[in-house]
Amino acid sequence: MNDTSTLYKKLQSGEFAITAELSPPKAPDLSRLDKHIENYKVGVDAVNILDMPSATLRMSSLGTAIYVKQQGLEPVLQMTCRDRSKLAQQADIIAAYAHGIRNVLCLTGDYVTFGDHPMSKPVFDMDSTNLIMMVNQLRSAGRAYSGTPIADSAKEEPFKMQWCIGGAANPAGNKPHHLARTINRKAEAGVDFLQTQPIFDLEAFDQWWTALDKQGVHDKVKILPGILPPRSLRGLSFMVEHVPGIWVPPKVISRIENASDQKEEGIQMCLEIMQTIKQKYPIAGFHLYPLAWTETVPRMLKDLNLFPAADNAA
Amino acid sequence: MYNRVWTKGRLYRLLFAIEEWSKKRVFGCHSCGQCVLRSTSMVCPQTCPKQMRNGPCGGSMFGKCEVFPDKECIWTKINERADNPAVDGTLGMKDKLFNKIQPAVDWSLVGTSAVANIFSKKIDPNGAIQSPHPVPKKVLNDLIASDRIVEHFDPS
Ligand code: SF4
């Protein structure tokens, strides 16, 4: 059985970690991901393989994660509660582990009506906090949801899968002390790290962080703020309208709107946000949402001096 | 969907109908059979499109529901009510919302009477199911440390 996750080791040792996102293709052709995988290979520690984002049909995250792993990049398997029951979720988790996947991101999932199959059944057999608790139990006790041991015979010791467990947090949109309650419950459930929704509003982020600080929550979990470089005003407005849970203050929209080069302005803005956050708060790393614009990732990491030193010289 | 209540006797169905009718009128009850109202500021979490039992989903924005934006997110209601000293005082809501994790719905209880399930000890008065389910990290680690893990999961 091979080793534990490198992301986990990095987070535990306090090294700065970078994660990013990769959306599986719709057509059964994995080579379409190759150029993105290349862009991620240097500097990105692990990449989230999305589980049908916005409830739109795609290849399964498990199938894609196996491919990404074979290509030499560490995957984070996204698991939503939207489409699978307790049984199906655990079956996929065991299969992923057997294929060498060591990171799992536990999400509730966007509702089915957002996507192209609004007539599909929303399962939601549990919520993200319960999913975290379930994976933690598989990890520390080798016991399934129902308590049955993960073993093929009564004589065998239960198998303890060494998962690195992630979750999501949305720092905007609700009262910070209300959000702190949810995060504390995720921490109690056994989450190791939390990736946030894209941050555009530093004020809201600060209020959220202060609330976590006050209640002693952020010491319990590693936090990776989300960063999304907007490619154009159109892309940004589309996201605000169609992707749930993203808050973009009007001054950010007008900044992109008035820029002569919207692409460059988007990157500059993200770099500023990253620099401020990195200086002010004890974060564990960043989570990048470049969408299909993965070429910008090496450049952003270089500008922030987060690129591995050996590759900087090249 | 098949409703378990049809496997029960007549008296059970009559009492269940009364419980269901009254709880539906007041709380929008969905008869999950494991009533957690006392742990969710008396707001039924089954009225959430995603049945979130441990806090809002990531799409809850400015008090509005991700799925039906003209409706209030139930978790805004739960959290706002918990901030009210009277509610917090009677139900201990702040502590519950901060520290207590609600297990996922046990589908073998859906469509049965929560009141009957309290009497038969399938759930406790706060709605915590007594059937097997994962436990929080600290509880689990204590079980492992004290070597009570087998006892906890395979009581016999
Ligand atoms: S926004 Fe609130 S009510 Fe709507 S699905 Fe999410 S948690 Fe449930």
Image: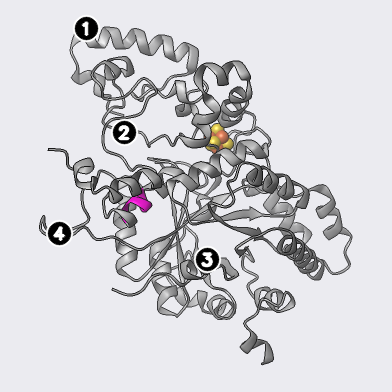
Where is mark 1, residue-wise?
A: B11
Vertical side of A262 occupied by B125: above or below: above
Q: What is the chain letter for disc 1?
A: B
Regarding mark 4 in the picture, which secondary structure is present there?
loop
Callouts 4 and 2 close, C-beta under 8 Å:
no
Q: Earlier in the sequence, mark 1 or mark 2?
A: 1
Where is mark 4, residue-wise?
A: A152
* Marks 4, 1: nearer the viewer: 4
Q: Which residues are magenta?
A: A134-138
Q: What is the chain letter for disc 4?
A: A
Vertical side of A295 occupied by B42: above or below: above
Q: For the residue marked with disc 1, what is the amino acid?
A: Leu
Q: What is the chain letter for disc 2?
A: B
Q: For the residue marked with disc 3, what is the amino acid?
A: Leu
Q: Earlier in the sequence, mark 4 or mark 3?
A: 3
Residue shown at 61%/41% (left/top)?
Answer: A215
Where is mark 2, residue-wise?
A: B106
- Between the C-alphas of marks 1 and 2, the distance is 24 Å
Q: Tell me the tag on residue A247.
A: none
Q: For the residue marked with disc 4, what is the amino acid?
A: Asp
* Marks 3, 1: nearer the viewer: 3
Callouts 4 and 1 close, C-beta under 8 Å:
no
Residue shown at 50%/60% (left/top)?
Answer: A50
